[in-house]
Image (cartoon, grey):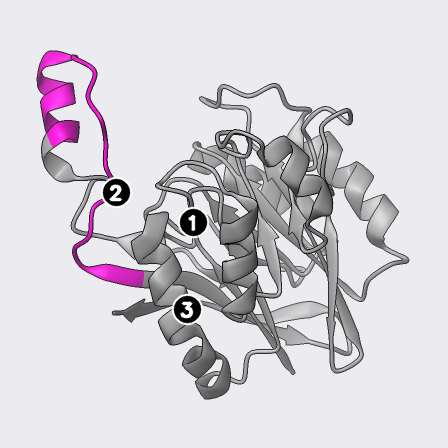
Amino acid sequence: MLKLLFIGDIVGRPGREIVANRLPRIRTEHAVDFVIANAENAAAGAGITGSIAKSILESGVDAITLGDHVWDQRGWENEITQMERVCRPANLPRACPGWDHLVIEARGFRVAVFTVLGRSFMNMKAECPFAAADRMIDQLRSQADAIIVEIHAEATSEKQALGWYLDGRVTAVLGTHTHVPTADATVLPKGTGFICDVGMTGPYASVLGREVRPVVERFLDGMPRRFDVATGDVRLSGALVAIDASMARANKVELLTVRE
C-alpha cells in the first residue's frame, strides 16, 4: 500500500508557512510516499512565482499543480519553463508554456498527475476537460503506474461527472478551486478515489482566504476593494489517498485537516 497526499489550494504566506512547518511531520506520521500540492494562490493569494515554487518544493512537496490563476504573476510565463516539478493545467491551449503533467516516483512506483480546468462558471480559454482527460490518459498509460487527475472547477456537478467518467481508468479524481473541503470522499465502484474539493491550505477565518470585511462590503455596495490575504485559523487541508500498488486503484480516500 502506498499513500499520496494532495494538498488543497495554498493561499498566501499563511498557507506556505503551515506547509513548511507541518508537512515533514505529516509525511512521517501518515507514512506518505507522494505529496502533490495546488499552489496557484501561493503568491499573495493570486498566482505563483519561481522563488515561491522553489520554497514549497523545499518544504517536502514533490509536485506542484496550478489552476485558473496560473498567469496572475508577472514574468511567471518565463519562469515556469525552468520548473521541472510544476505543471500548468493540461487543457489550456498547447501554445502555453510549461509542463502539462508531471511524473513522480517513490519505492519504484510511478505516479502521473495532471490538472484539467472546468468550464462551467470559469473564465478561461480551455479545452473540454473530458476530452483533455482522455487525451492525457492515453499519453500517460505507458509512463506511469498510477494516474491522479485534479479537476480545478467551480461546479460540483462537473467534478462529479468527471469522476464517474474516469472511474476505473485513473487512480483518483480530486477536486480543487472552491477552497471549501467537501464531505464526499469515496472510492467509486471501479476503484477510482474521488472528492469534490480537498479544501484550502490557508486562513479559514476568512472568505475563501481573504479578509472578511472588504469582501462583505463588496457584496453590500459593489465597490471595488483590495482583498488582502487573511491570517486567522490557519489550516492545512488535503486528501489522503491509499493506493493499492498491485492494481493502481484507490483503497481509501479521506480528508486530512491539520490546524496550525
Which element type, helix, strand or loop, lies under badge 2?
loop
Q: Based on the displayed image, in which of its 4 quarters is residue 16 positioned?
A: bottom left
Residue displayed at 16% across by 55% down = 232
Whether residue 39 is visible to the viewer of this picture, yes or no, is yes
Residue displayed at 9% across by 33% down = 213
- Tell me the quarter of the image containing the N terminus: bottom right
- Tell me the quarter of the image containing the C terminus: bottom left
| Sequence-wise first label, 1 or 2 | 1
Residue 2 left/right relative to 157:
right
Q: Which of 155 and 115 is in front in this view?
A: 115
- Kind of residue indicated by mark 2: Val
**Furthest residue toward right:** 142
Residue 102 left/right relative to 72:
right
Residue displayed at 37% across by 52% down = 199
Magenta region, residue range: 214-235
Q: How far apart are marks 3 and 2 (CA)?
A: 18 Å
Q: Residue under label 1, please give it.
A: 9
Q: How far apart are marks 3 and 1 (CA)?
A: 14 Å
Residue 37 left/right relative to 155:
right
- Kind of residue indicated by mark 1: Asp
Q: Residue under label 2, please give it.
A: 229
| Sequence-wise first label, 3 or 1 | 1
Q: Residue under label 3, please give it.
A: 20
- Kind of residue indicated by mark 3: Ala
